[in-house]
Amino acid sequence: MQRAPALVSASTNALPWTPLRRLAPLVEHPHIIKCLTSGDPVFVPDTGKEAFTPSERLAIGQRQLKSILYVPLLLEGSPIGTVIVSSQDDIRELTPHQVDLC
């Protein structure tokens, strides 16, 4: 899985809507790998206190992300992708129960 390329696609809240896309080695995105391999959401409450790879840090910096929630997309129990929900304005705190609801 780590050698497979991942299509990284994102949108921002800026108008007009402009998607950012690139094909990136999945190994450069360990938070996505953790989400996909565990099948569980991965929550990063404060991006300023988390260790990220250079590729992750670039994406976070371009979008000025403060908190990130990686949510696995599962089909019949197998991972097929990840949805990433983030905040740009404030650091968010989620309880374990709120993360589990995802």
Image (spheres, rainbow, N blue to C red):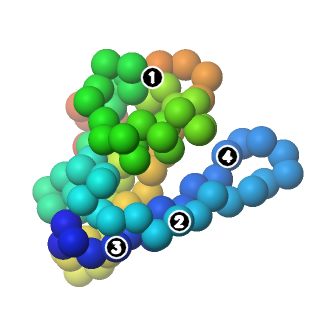
Q: In the shown orientation, is residue 41 left or right of residue 85?
A: left
> Is residue 93 among what the camera can see?
no
Q: Mark 1 points at which residue?
A: 92
Residue type (three-letter) at the residue carrying disc 4: Thr
Residue 45 percent coordinates (x, y): 36, 25
Q: Earlier in the sequence, mark 4 or mark 2?
A: 4
Tag 1 secondary structure: loop
Judge by depth and name the residue closer to the eye, 34 or 101.
34
Task: Tell which circle, 3 or 2, labels the residue nearer the N-terminal end.
Answer: 3
For the residue labelled by badge 2, is the local secondary structure a helix, a strand or a loop? strand
- Residue found at the very far front of the displayed protein: 54
Q: How crowded is mark 3: few (under 14 residues within 10 Å), some or many (20 or more)?
A: some
Q: What residue type is labelled 3?
A: Pro
| Mark closer to the observer (3, 1) | 3
Amino acid marked by disc 2? Arg
Name which residue lies at 45% across and 50% down: 84
Quadrant of residue 7 in the image?
bottom left
Q: On the image, numbered disc 3 is attached to which residue?
A: 5
Q: Which residue position holds label 4? A: 12
Residue nearer the viewer, 46 or 25: 25
Residue 40, image x, y percentages: 21, 52
Q: Of the residues shown, which amino acid type is indicated by label 1?
A: Arg
Q: What residue sits 15% from the left and 62% below the top?
A: 37
Name the residue beneath numbered marker 2: 22
